[in-house]
Amino acid sequence: MSRRSRLEREHLAECFGANLARARRAADVSQDELACRSSTHRTAISQIERGISLPGLDSALKFAAVLETTLDELLEGIAWKAPELAVGKFEFPDQASTDPERASSTP
């Protein structure tokens, strides 16, 4: 994993963890209760809230249900921007210089 990917993952974990902690406090639910009701270990809840680890999709769904919130709220401030799709093409620089018909026509 590249350094950039690692930093992005760390930031993602911190943001999700802060959102989870905020939603848990707003619902007046302890880490122990959230862990019990979502079939997750309490230390995992602590690690997620501190941005040390990320939950799987199944756990995130459980957290949202227990806290009576949405995944949108738990993912607030997190977005993915897909890269632009660029269509490639073959280039034959040697042929273009030797074939005048190809050099003058552009697709």
Image (cartoon, helix red, strand yellow):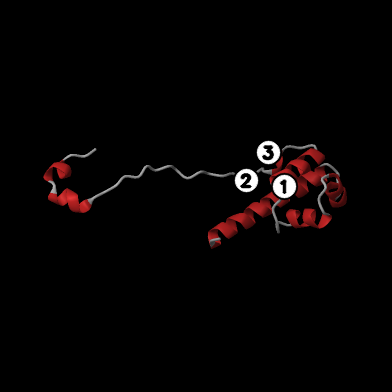
Q: Residue at x 53, y 61 (%)?
A: 2
Q: Depth check: 97 or 31 in front?
A: 97
* Left or right: residue 81 compared with residue 56: left
Task: Work out whether mark 1 precedes mark 3 in sequence or the reverse, and give the earlier one.
Answer: 1
| Distance between mark 1 and mark 3 Cα atoms | 10 Å
In the drawing, does residue 95 fall left or right of residue 63?
left
Q: Which residue lies under the disc numbered 1?
A: 19
Residue 86, position as x, y percentages in the image: 39, 43
Q: Of marks 2 and 1, which one's residue comes earlier in the chain?
A: 1
- Asked if residue 67 shows in the view, the reply is no
Circles 2, 3 touching at the beta carbon (< 8 Å): no
Q: Residue 78, relative to residue 7: is it above or below?
A: above
**Which is nearer the N-term, disc 2 or disc 3?**
3
Circle 3: residue type: Asp
Q: Which mark is residue 11?
A: none
Residue assigned mark 2:
78
Q: Residues within 10 Å of mark 3 (few under 14, many from 20)?
A: few
In the rendered image, the residue lying farthest to the bottom is: 3
Contact flag, marks 2 and 1 (Cβ < 8 Å): yes
Which residue is pictured at 67% across the width and 43% down the height? Answer: 75
Circle 3 SS class: helix
Say which amino acid is labelled 2: Ile
Label 1 crowd (10 A; few <14 / some 14-19 / many >=20): some
Which SS class for mark 1?
helix
Above or below for 98 versus 71: below
The quadrant of the picture occupied by the N terminus is bottom right
- Residue 61 pos. (x, y %): 74, 41
73 or 35, which lies in front? 35
Which residue corresponds to mark 3?
A: 72
Badge 2 marks a residue whose secondary structure is loop
Report how far apart the C-alphas of labels 2 and 3 lie in the structure.
Answer: 9 Å
In-image side of 91 versus 45 (left or right): left
